[in-house]
Image (tube, helix red, strand yellow):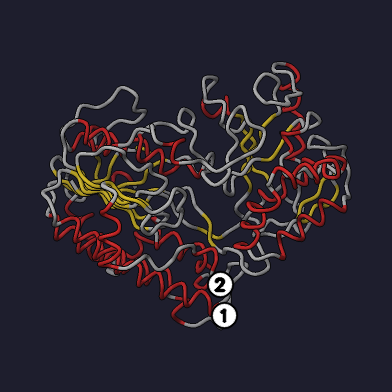
Amino acid sequence: MLFIGLDAAEPGLLREGIAAGRLPHLRALAERGVSGSLANGMLTLPGAVWPEIASGVSCGTLPRFFHPRQVITGSAAPRALTAADVAGDPTFWGVASAQGRRVAVVDIPHAPLATSLNGVQVAEYGLHDPHFGTASYPAPLIDALTATYGAYTVPSCDHYGGTAGSNLRLLTDLLDGLERKTNLLLDLLQRDDWDLFACAFSESHCVGHWCWHYSDPAHWGFEPDAPQALVDAVNTVYARLDAAAGRLMAAANATCTIVLASHGMAPYVAGYQLLPEVLARLGVSSGPAGRGSVIRDLQTRAKHWVPRRYWERLGRLVVEQPVMRALLRPLQRGSGAMFFPLESPATRAVYVPNNTIGAIRLNLKGREPFGCVEPGADADQLVGRLRAELLALRQPASGQPIVSEVVTADETFGPSHHPDVPDLIVRFRQDLGLLDTCESASVGRVHVPVGSRWGRRSGDHSPHSAVWMAGEGCTPGAACAPGSLLDVAPTILEALGCERPAFLDGRPLRARATVSASQEE
């Protein structure tokens, strides 16, 4: 069984490449197997995409949705998820290993490192989202592999700078890293007769974030004089990924092969960064309502002017330290500008990070350390007010509303969802261009620039996922009936002949009826 994940590779662009002959190995896989689109949670908790793929469990139950900075129920300050937090999370390779299958796993994003495994695992050798550190099981393996193939060439694509010159360097480093990683994977693949070999590539993720605008004349960041290498950057990386997948498929000669485009890529729109200021002006953050605040404005300007890599260090090493927080808290509280608003009993609702899908958490009594919102009628009234105010936000240039939908956790996941899940999900429109300014009668005009002036992403995720699968029971050229990312884990376990655990929320894709591609259209 061979599983290859293409992290944040846009399915529509992959299909164009297949049709045009630019991706011959994916095309061959599609012709000898089944393929189709999969539903995902990108419009709810985008950061949960890979945890749902790995576990087969809904993010409403297993709330791993923003690993760098997440509110854990019982704490008023968001923090990074640690390896200890995710150590007990189920994975399809863990289940397969426990049932006696020989497994090899490399660079599945957001995945915990196994403490025991019937096989090997390499974690965070070359990923867009490294959180827990490069490591392996058994522990000496990573040092041996790095000595042979070298360290991965892109520690963080967000730290390159975003200029044409820096993006050319990024592209070169991504292609170099992809070659190193492919050779590493082929080495591991040939070391044993694996029942399951699972890996993922993140080069599609990085090139999408930083080079999406070069080939799209309608993009707000389009550069008509960009070097041709950047115009072709996304297609170049996708072609190299196809070649890498082809090499792996040839070497594995697996009875079942799955290639998964985890989620897609599209123009970066934003909107989420407006929420902290909007909540402050509505008077539900850490201080009284106010349309102007020197402290809030200074914090916004600092974040925009300081390069991202330095801002992250400044926050972690200075601003978020207990002594500095204690010194700043009285000043920030008076202006609704606390770094951690849930530390104030005056806070009724707070923005929480959730990639580019807006998220809000209520300061509920009985759940939060400084809770002030009574569950029941008080919370319902607050939700109703926030929903109305958010839907009233307009883009000044067009006069159009910028929020398409506001949904609650109960509406999305049901009343038994995990308490770590945000209480409100705010979806911003994707058809208005860059959303950095809004206005309404209640908040006035709010302007919060996107990212840092030293570099801002041009591509962000689309709610598209796709699978290509070949093996026993797969009708050549057919299309899968509708499924979701939650079905990936049970599909892999079925292909391995494993007993399916009761906790899985998905079901095998191959257990569903298939229809011809013409019928699906």
Report the residue at 49% width, 83% height from top.
227
Q: In which quarter of the image is residue 481?
A: top left
Q: Where is residue 373 in the image (x, y as percent from the top left)?
A: 75, 23
Report the residue at 28% width, 67% height from top.
149
What element does badge 2 sit on?
loop
Q: Is residue 134 above or below residue 472?
A: below
Q: Position of residue 221 (x, y in %)?
A: 61, 70
Going from N to C along the chain, the mark reached first, 2 or 1, is: 2
What residue does disc 2 label? 217
Does the rendering let one see residue 499?
yes
Nearest to the observer: residue 250 or residue 517: 250
Labelled pair 2, 1 in contact (Cβ < 8 Å): yes
Q: Position of residue 334 (x, y in %)?
A: 87, 41
What residue does disc 1 label? 224
Mark 1 residue type: Pro
What element does badge 1 sit on?
loop
Nearest to the observer: residue 107 or residue 465: 107
Q: Position of residue 106 (x, y in %)?
A: 29, 51
